Image (cartoon, helix red, strand yellow):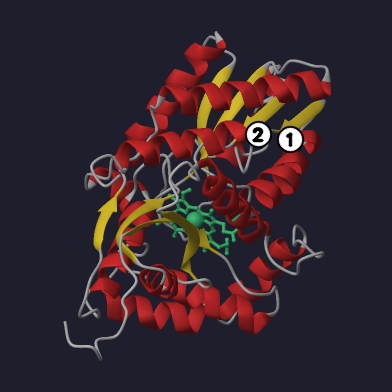
Amino acid sequence: MPTDHPAIAHGRIGVLIVNLGTPDGTDYQSMRRYLKEFLSDRRVIELNPLAWKVILNLFILPFRPQKSGKAYAAIWNEARDESPLRTLTRAQGEGLGRALSHDDRIVVDWAMRYGQPSIAKKIDALKQKGCDRIAVMALYPQYSASTTASVYDQLFRHLMTLRWQPAVRTMAPYHDDGDYIKALVASVERKIAETGWEPDMLLASFHGIPKSYFEAGDPYHCHCQKTGRLLREALGYDENRFMVTFQSRFGPKEWLQPYTDQTLEALPGMGKKKVMVISPGFASDCVETLEEIGLEGKKLFLDAGGEAFARIDCLNDHPDHIALLAKLLDKELKGWL
Ligand SMILES: C=CC1=C(C)c2cc3[nH]c(cc4nc(cc5[nH]c(cc1n2)c(C)c5CCC(=O)O)C(CCC(=O)O)=C4C)c(C)c3C=C
Ligand SMILES: [Fe+2]
Ligand SMILES: [Fe+2]
């Protein structure tokens, strides 16, 4: 080796967990920047790109940043001046770092698909630390092209720019993993113990996707239904006491049904007055769980005559969740360790 050859860090193994992303602030410009990046992703909006560009710029970006900014402001983490999703994803990364510290070659970090910290920046940082093998985990238990595939697209897009690529592994969805279901069951039991009442209906509310994506072959709906069935069976609930619903509709097209908001409004009239909502598809609490379910959904239900409402926290950085993610990664890293 020539004596002037630069020292190159090598031999370490990176783990990058990736969540959806989040705005840097709730003001118009921050929200606009975030929504523009998100809604320009062709995995998210499968319309004719030119037509969509016109619609996005003329009809969505002038208005949606204000509306969404209000929703984010209602749940913002003021202490850290960041969204709860970013706070929780960081905590998950740190927890996972400790859980995988059994091998000092492993370096764990976290990134966002949209906004900061970006996947590109974190892949570069892991390479700098000597990671020549990197496992990337999209934090979505149920696979959807609009979320999971979009994370891995973005990863590979960055790899295309690198002369010296690390070896990478992507992760399979874990919607039916036994420890995932057990962690969800334990979160329901914690909420029952905390509130002192049992629900006469437990809604498992997943983020929706357009129905046309499902019809085109996206497995997301099937993954959500399977998670729902396994959770219901593990809780010992019958179908009168458990429902899978879909939230966060966007745009005029039909999305996966039944819709969470309409269901919450209808339940009191069906004699279901004590309702809990769990969000198994969200690895971390975010605007969609804290605001859309915890504030808006609760109001819809109580205004329609409901008597008791409770929102069950996502698995977040609970030890059960960290142990689950560590187990999935340990399995994936076999052969590298
Ligand atoms: C967990 C799975 C998710 C799927 C599937 C999903 C699909 C999807 N989302 C939109 C549009 C929006 N989603 C927004 C927020 C948001 N979405 C998810 C997760 C999934 N989205 C999360 C975790 C969040 C919250 C992020 C946070 O910072 O808290 C938003 C922004 C908020 C708003 O303006 O309402 C939009 C827009 C589409 C179109 C889509 C499927 C095609
Ligand atoms: Fe979304
Ligand atoms: Fe929403």
Q: Residue at 31% across / 46% down in the picture?
A: 171
Q: Quadrant of the N terminus?
A: bottom left
* Circle 2: residue type: Leu
Secondary structure, mark 1, is helix
Above or below, 202 relative to 150: above
* Circle 1: residue type: Phe
Q: Nearer the viewer, residue 27 or 241?
A: 27
Q: CA distance from mark 2 to mark 1?
A: 5 Å
118 horizontally vs 53: left or right: right
Q: Which residue is mark 1?
A: 301
Q: Residue at 70% across / 67% down in the picture?
A: 82
Residue 222, by quadrant, is top left
Residue that protrudes farthest toward the front in the picture = 3
Coordinates of residue 113 in the picture (x, y in percent): 44, 65
Return the mark for residue 264.
2
Secondary structure, mark 2, is helix
Coordinates of residue 54 in the picture (x, y in percent): 39, 83
219 horizontally vs 91: left or right: left
Coordinates of residue 65 in the picture (x, y in percent): 62, 75
Label 2: how many Cα within 10 Å (few below 14, some 14–19, many 20+): many
